[in-house]
Amino acid sequence: MTRQPGQPCPIEPSDPVQDIAHLGNIELLTPRIDLTTAYFRDLLGMEVVHAAGPSVFLRGYGDYAASTLKLTAAPRPGIGCISWRTTSPAALDRRVNAIEAAGRAGRWIDPECGRGPSFRFRDPDGHVMAIYYEEAPYRAPEHLRSTLKNLPMRYTGRGVNVRRIDHVALLSRDVAADRRFMEEVLGFRLREQVRFDRGAVEIGSWLSPSILHHQVAYVVDTRRVGGRLHHIALWVDNREDVLRAADICSEHGVFIEAGPAKHNNSQGFYLYAYEPGGNRIELYTGSFLVLAPDWRPVIWDEAERGTGVYWGGALPESFLSYATPDAAAAAPVDAARVPVFDPS
Ligand SMILES: [Fe+2]
């Protein structure tokens, strides 16, 4: 049927949901809040903007929001609340309704550090997530004001100099269930997927609400713990910054688990290091954007996937077995696996 001029454009049932704009904030739990804060501030070059109760709030120099990373003191390392900004207030209402219609209980959380009220819920595996719309743009204090009008904060050039948060990678006892929830309830698009046993078993799925290649990944939790973190990823401007990060980590005794090297899926250039609380941190750049609205997910089998490395050193066994909280560790943190970073 042809639409007449002046008639509203009908929403087709097949139109994609585009209610989630992007990853807005990551909360990381750490048993060593002072060392973890020093790691992100002094080594990775993020800016501390606020502290309240057990939490410290930070930002990358290119983030438009006041804070994109929240560190919270906790008995064990792991992931706290993962917050997604919606595209509008109406989009927030629609997604809240969709979450409740999907049978997932949620509750509203008070505003925090520039963000308005958020609706908090859990994904099927138990990871805590929230959606919100209101976000006050960051206003840099005088000493952090950039001479560049479109840069929210001065390029400090400190340490690794993280520009912005990029994505989270989560473990899941049922990757398909989490992937379907993100697709069907929140409107994420599937970018790439790994399926083993001739496609019968979904091992990993990479999804995004925006043109960024992925902002959340779910990979199978072989220990079936639930709600665990594989890593958070922070974006740097170029590959040279990843190489500099390797130098900086080495000079400060920070354990480098893998990289610098290049992934096959996402084509990302990476370095994986542990922060002092025990969480795995990826310093990341180079992955491709997905502009095509009719993108067809790329499916890898075990032979095509290989180790997940396009070139560079192989990923170690710990990359497959270690996550936070660590299911194998009886103590809150296995100190032998996490070299202490001395901020001095
Ligand atoms: Fe990653």
Image (cartoon, rainbow, N blue to C red):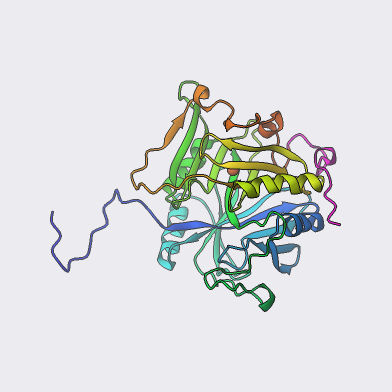
Front position in the image: 201 or 292: 292
Quadrant in which the C terminus is drawn: bottom right
Q: Which residue is drawn at 62% across and 63% down?
A: 61
Q: Is residue 341 left or right of residue 150?
A: right
Relative image position of residue 331 (x, y in whole percent):
83, 41
The single residue placed furthest to the bottom in the displayed view is: 142
Q: 51 or 309: which is nearer to us?
A: 309
Residue 333 magenta-highlighted:
yes
Residue at image point 72% right, 37% down = 257
Asked where in the image residue 311 lies, by quadrant, the reply is: top right
**Position of 328 relative to 138 (above/below):** above
Q: Give the range drawn in magenta.
A: 327-344
Q: Residue 48's spot in the image, x, y percent?
A: 71, 65
**Which quadrant of the picture is home to ligand 1?**
top right
Q: How far across and down, in percent of the image, does residue 69 sit?
A: 65, 59
Give the side of residue 89 with respect to residue 174, left or right: left
Asked whether, in this view, residue 106 is left or right of residue 157, the answer is left
Quadrant (top left/top right/bottom left/bottom right) for the N terminus = bottom left
Where, by quadrant of the figure, is residue 35 drawn? bottom right
- Within the magenta stretch, is there residue 295? no
68 on left or right of 302:
right
Q: Please name the residue shown 72% across and 63% down the image.
A: 56
Q: Position of residue 334 (x, y in %)?
A: 82, 40
Q: Main secondary structure of the magenta part?
A: loop
